[in-house]
Amino acid sequence: MSPASAVVAAVRVLAAVAARALSPSSCAGCDAPVADAAVFCSDCARTAVPYAERPPQGAVGSGAADGSLIAFAPFAGALADGIRRFKYGDRPDLARPFGRLLLCAARDAGLRAELVVPVPLHPRRLADRGYNQAALLAAHVADGLEASFAPRALCRVRSTAQQAQLPRDRRLENVAGAFRVRAPERVQRRSIALIDDVATTGATLAACRDALLGAGAASVTYLVLAAAESGADELRSSPPSARRT
Ligand SMILES: [Zn+2]
């Protein structure tokens, strides 16, 4: 992104956030008015039940078995609607309520991290969207956990076809080796929370984790808003990767 278009994008994001901040709080799923601290209206909240409030047998989120994935709730209902609005509907203001949900999930799971790193967007997609939703979420998480925020720790070394448009078996090969650590000395021996909005097959997260561990990070925990159930299974069955021995 050129400096000029970066400035234009930043101003657009600030204007959108400011406009929303001045209006009364609204539901992240449907824009119905809500009380100040609420993320969802009561109808939407019924469809976005956190893992922390579900019976244990269904839980893949908070306190996931191998400790490498923490998710707030399944990708469904109002949470899925809200995430789509956040990513594709020019709604960077939704980073605030969603950042709160991520922080809840992180705290419930007892996550400790020294460094908070978002999954990066390719510069061209960043220029189109004007913001990286994962980076906006990561800023909130870093703040809440009193960890360092490293929005540029990872970069995409090549553009990849949009994961959402690919069949499941093509997603892994699509992103393998697509990420690089910019400054390895920043991640070496650090415990890292890797942030994204959704874990589907987990291919993108795994490619980022491989780059971070390859650069010397001590551990990588995925922290996402929503997990697609099948994707979460795949993440849990992957090696207990998070530790480097
Ligand atoms: Zn709603």
Image: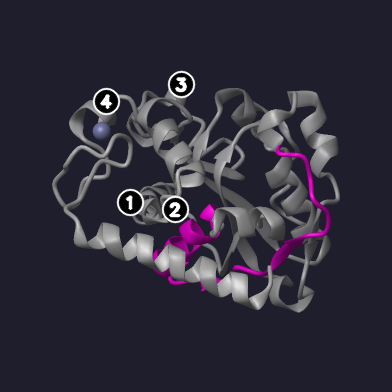
Query: Looking at the image, is 245 positioned above or below residue 18?
Result: above
Considering only order in the chain, which callout, 4 or 1, is on the residue closer to the N terminus? Answer: 4
Q: Viewer-proximal residue, 173 or 85?
A: 85
Around disc 1, counting alpha carbons within 10 Å, would you say few (fewer than 14), some (14 to 19), or many (20 or more)?
Answer: many
Q: Is residue 106 visible?
A: yes
Around disc 2, counting alpha carbons within 10 Å, would you say few (fewer than 14), some (14 to 19), or many (20 or more)?
Answer: few
- The disc placed on residue 97 is 1
Query: Looking at the image, is 193 positioned above or below residue 88?
Result: below
SS state under label 1: helix
Residue for badge 2: 110
Q: Quadrant of ligand 1?
A: top left
SS state under label 2: loop
Around disc 4, counting alpha carbons within 10 Å, would you say few (fewer than 14), some (14 to 19), or many (20 or more)?
Answer: few
- Range of residues picked out in magenta: 133-162
Q: Residue 96's spot in the image, x, y percent? A: 35, 56
Considering only order in the chain, which callout, 3 or 1, is on the residue closer to the N terminus? Answer: 3
What residue sits 71% from the left and 63% below the top? Answer: 154
Left or right: 170 in relation to 237? right
Quick check: marks 1 and 4 in contact, CB under 8 Å?
Answer: no
Q: Residue 219's spot in the image, x, y percent? A: 68, 58
Tell whether position 159 is magenta: yes
Amino acid type at circle 1 is Pro
User: Disc 2 to disc 3, how far (Cα)?
Assistant: 20 Å
What residue sits 22% from the left and 45% below the top? Answer: 26
Query: Looking at the image, is 129 positioned above or below residue 190?
Result: above
User: Disc 1 to disc 2, how far (Cα)?
Assistant: 20 Å
SS state under label 3: helix
Residue for badge 4: 46
Amino acid type at circle 3 is Gln
Considering only order in the chain, which callout, 4 or 2, is on the residue closer to the N terminus? Answer: 4
Tell whether position 124 is magenta: no
